[in-house]
Amino acid sequence: MKTIDMDSLKKAWKNEQGFQNKKLSENDIQQFLQQKSGDITQLFRKGLIFDGVLKSLVGISLVGIMILYAGNQRMLVAMAALLLLLCWTLWFQWKMYRKIPREMVSPPVVRTSLENRIQFYRKHYVKSLYIGALSNVLILVSGFLYYFYFRYGEVRPLDLKDYLVFTAAMLLAFAMGAGAQIAQHNFQVRQLESCLKEIDEDAMTVLTLQEQRNKRLRLIFMALTALILGLLLLAYLIFR
């Protein structure tokens, strides 16, 4: 049986610590900034595209409800109003998409490009996250209406308790959608701001990147957990 060489272990540990505390070169920093600038740009674009597709599917769902409840005049008016709201939100998100700053990849302006994206997020893009959260509410509403139709053939009479439950469910759906999206984007932006600060202080190391990667993985896990719990709650409210 081989004995453990403590001196070798200590040397390996010191080497590992030295690697983690190694400062990034100017070229490494420029590549990092360029990558992060592209990443946050893609985050903005993909978020808006996904919301646009989701809202389009919700629009199709609302049209389906109008067909099912064709004899209900009040329902037709309500669905028409929701479709108009949906069209406005799609127009708003499209305008936001076109406002996303263009990428600048030459080294002297990469940092400026990243700072512009952070400013764009705080000044403009965060509004689109609230608009995006409306999709959750509309999905919930259409889910209830489809459930009522296939269960009762119409919207059953509602009492005060039902109205309170439905209102609470819609508020919760909006709050969870907006809260999760804002938390995720704030986390990303704060990481970028922290990196820019460390670069200014000449304190950017490999360890910094590793810590950010670990925090990002934890955030993804928490977001997936919240999504699963939200879906279970939605299923309970619809099928209770």
Image: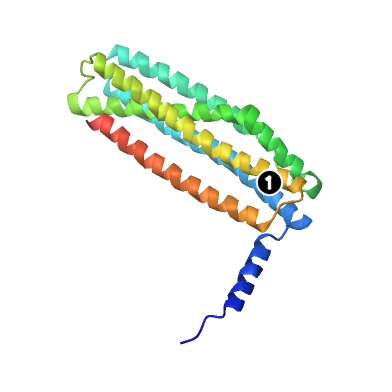
**Location of mark 1 (residue):** 195
In this rendering, position of residue 148 left or right of residue 17 = left
- Rendered image quadrant of residue 223: top left
User: What residue lies at 53% left-to-right and 39% top-to-bottom?
Assistant: 184
Circle 1: element type = helix
In this rendering, position of residue 199 left or right of residue 186 = right
Position of residue 65 relative to residue 43, above or below, is: above
User: What residue lies at 49% left-to-right and 48% top-to-bottom?
Assistant: 218
Q: Picture coordinates of residue 91 (x, y %)? A: 55, 25
Q: Amino acid at mark 1?
A: Cys
Q: Can residue 63 be spotted in the picture? A: no
Quarter of the N terminus within the rendering: bottom left
Decide which of 216, 127 is in the foreground and name it.
Answer: 216
Q: Picture coordinates of residue 102 (x, y %)? A: 70, 39
Q: How many marks?
A: 1
Color scheme of the displayed model: rainbow
Decide which of 200, 162 is in the foreground and name it.
Answer: 200
Q: Picture coordinates of residue 23 (x, y %)? A: 73, 58
Quarter of the C terminus within the rendering: top left
Decide which of 119, 221 is in the foreground and name it.
Answer: 221
Q: Residue furthest right?
A: 108
Quick one: label 1, few (<14), some, or many (20+) residues within 10 Å? many
User: What residue lies at 29% left-to-right and 26% top-to-bottom?
Assistant: 144
